[in-house]
Image: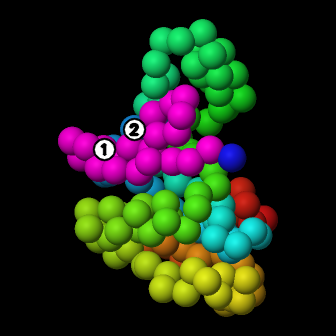
Amino acid sequence: MDFFTIYLKNNDLVIENSFTAQKIRLDSIDDVIIFSAQERGRFKVFIFTTLPIITEAKSETFINKLVFSAFKTFNKNSNEIKTHFEEKEVNTLLKILADNLDNVMISNDLEGSLLWRETDNGFTIKGIKLIYSKNKLGLAEVLKKHNILR
């Protein structure tokens, strides 16, 4: 399990772990969704962007270069981040988004995430919350747009 540091730098959302730093231009964030915690306090978060996410190695050590190379090999879509965050990291992310983007929908019931249920476009969707949509789409539309819901 890796821990993340999330912060804002020069209008970029930066998500760092021990090996990489991912930089996302705030104005390129298209959609953000969060999935309920499967483990207590651990959430899956998907961030979709309109511009490629810049990923850099944190250092030039052999292990970092190896991990970074593997990351580049398996990360086929440079316009999305799909990862797991601890509750503290999710709260940091939500605060940064709310402070810098319009129409961010902050879920104040992270602890009750297993009970999340939303009806949208005739679909009952369990365990997922839409946090942000640049084009003000509903949850079902965002899930369809990113081929999560068919």
Q: Which SS class for mark 2?
A: strand
Residue 19 magenta-highlighted:
yes
User: Is residue 141 visible to the viewer in this orientation of the structure?
Assistant: no
x and y, in percent, of residue 141 in the image? 60, 71
> In this rendering, is residue 136 above or below 8?
below
What amino acid is at disc 1? Asp
In this image, 46 relative to 25: left or right? Answer: right
Classified by dominant secondary structure, the portion drawn in magenta counts as: strand
Q: Which residue is mark 1?
A: 12
Kindly identify the amino acid type of the residue bearing the numbered disc 2: Lys
Residue 64, percent across and down? 58, 19
Do the CB atoms of the residues marked 1 and 2 lie less than 8 Å apart? yes
Crowdedness near tag 1: few (<14), some (14–19) or many (≥20) residues, C-alpha within 10 Å: some
Quarter location, residue 114: bottom right
* Residue at 49%, 60% in the rendered image: 89
Tell me the element at label 1.
strand
Residue shown at 34% from the left, 50% from the top: 7
Q: Nearer the viewer, residue 103 or 66?
A: 66
Q: Which residues are magenta?
A: 2-21
Q: The C terminus appears in which quarter of the rendering? A: bottom right
Residue holding disc 2 = 23
Q: Quadrant of residue 122?
A: bottom right
Q: Nearer the viewer, residue 14 or 130?
A: 14
